[in-house]
Image (cartoon, coloured by chain):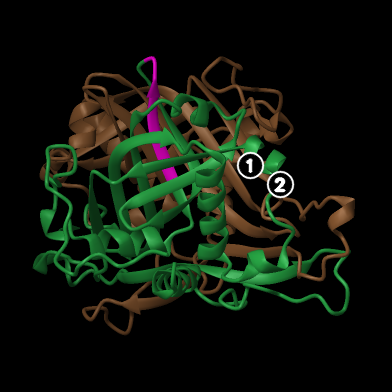
Chain colours: A green, B brown
Amino acid sequence: MNKPTSPQAAYPVEDRNRIRRRHDRAAYDHASVHAVLDAGMLAHVSYVIDGQPYCTPTIHWREGTRLYWHGSSASRMLRAQAKGVPVCVSVAMLDGLVMARTGMNHSANYRSAMCFGTAALVEGVDEKTHALLAMLERYFPGRNETLRGFSAQDIKATKVVGMEIETAVAKARADINHDEPEDLENPTWAGVIEVRQVIGERTPCPHNTARAIPSGLEAYAPGRRLDEAMGELARLYAAEPA
Amino acid sequence: MNKPTSPQAAYPVEDRNRIRRRHDRAAYDHASVHAVLDAGMLAHVSYVIDGQPYCTPTIHWREGTRLYWHGSSASRMLRAQAKGVPVCVSVAMLDGLVMARTGMNHSANYRSAMCFGTAALVEGVDEKTHALLAMLERYFPGRNETLRGFSAQDIKATKVVGMEIETAVAKARADINHDEPEDLENPTWAGVIEVRQVIGERTPCPHNTARAIPSGLEAYAPGRRLDEAMGELARLYAAEPA
């Protein structure tokens, strides 16, 4: 369950999340930040060990203003984050190449969300089980009912990290090229080349039988934009009773 | 110009880049790391300011074992990295959703490269100009010849950061689902759902004339995989005379 926050809710603007460059592209409201988090399936988590920054890509999920990710008990990242450490979690999508008439005016269309908080392990079998079931339900609604449930050993071997989003910012560019008036005569092609992430073909497991039921995969139709599927699944997840 | 390093060349295995979990998926050779860096257009850069980690998405480019990124002189990231600071740069691509017969055995196919080094500003007009021209040439071969060149003001307003890759690691999963023998009777659909990033349609600038020439865009055909286009362009860039 993942109730939407109020339409007016926003993250506080602090030194660490204030956008200095092109602040017209920035948004601090929950809706803008959560839309990017929900449209992406891959986050990058930054954390520090002995002064050395690390940047680890991982699957993430969201419950309200909390972010989660998970991994093996052997993971360096998850061991480092056990006790509560400052992290920055970013989700970004490239949406297009912006071709202009000078090198300087080339750009990219993108959406990004940068979230700050304190990561800590989700402790306790019940809490971990709840979080892992939430992950499955958010990505593949109803699928867990068709699976053998998590075993005690599964839960033990997995670490789950949770982070309350203390503050965050979304930044996006969705625009055409902008050139100086004096460059418009240049006959080079200018404009935007779209880039998108799409769902491809399904490769069935050789052990599937003819009666294999694709439970929870309805949203992942071949050829569909992944961000649209992810956004739809997030809205479905938010709407269902806890 | 970007000469390939020798096929045997590898990054040193150190504490910060050693993969502890699933080291069978890790590779330290230049070819494996560079293939991921070259296939992606979006990097995430992690750095630390006063103990706080930041994770900034940005376009990157590579010359041999050096990585580059750039931005406005107003950027917090680029100001923080002016003097030489430890950073971690990751490039990751989601390639598929791995659907299994237990929640625990669900996974993702992906490719990632994590690079460690010391970021510092590229100083000097000639060095900055060279780096920005290299970026254009790597992404859009021959395009710069059709553009008005960078002005002194363009160069001044842009900061370029360079980083020698001190060490790095590539990690990838490209596999089907793996289930326990006792779960194979479960009739739920299992297998892999491919995810890919593709090049979409072109939206021309309203100022383009009928004779607009799409210089440097030959690789970006609509419908093509972006990683394939990027890899092809990287090989072209490596092959051309300095």
**x then y, percent, for residue B83:** 22, 19
Q: Give the residue displayed 53% in from the left and 56% down from the top.
A: A135
Q: Give the residue displayed 63% in from the left and 42% down from the top.
A: A155
Q: State whether residue A10 is above or below residue A51.
A: below
Check disc 2 and report the residue beneath it: A151
Given the image, on which type of amino acid does mark 2 rest?
Ser
Q: Nearer the viewer, residue A202 or B80?
A: A202
Q: Is residue A25 left or right of residue B235?
A: left
Is residue B68 among the parts visible in the rendering? no
Q: State whether residue A27 is above or below residue A181.
A: above
Same-chain status of marks 1 and 2:
yes
Residue B234 lies within the magenta run: no
Cβ atoms under marks 1 and 2 closer than 8 Å: yes
Q: Secondary structure at mark 1?
A: helix
- What residue span does the magenta drawing correspond to? A44-50
Check disc 1 and report the residue beneath it: A155
Q: State whether residue A206 is above or below residue B171.
A: below
Q: CA distance from mark 1 to mark 2?
A: 6 Å
Q: Give the residue displayed 75% in from the left and 51% down from the top.
A: B175
Is residue B192 among the parts visible in the rendering? yes
Q: Nearer the viewer, residue B216 or A213?
A: A213
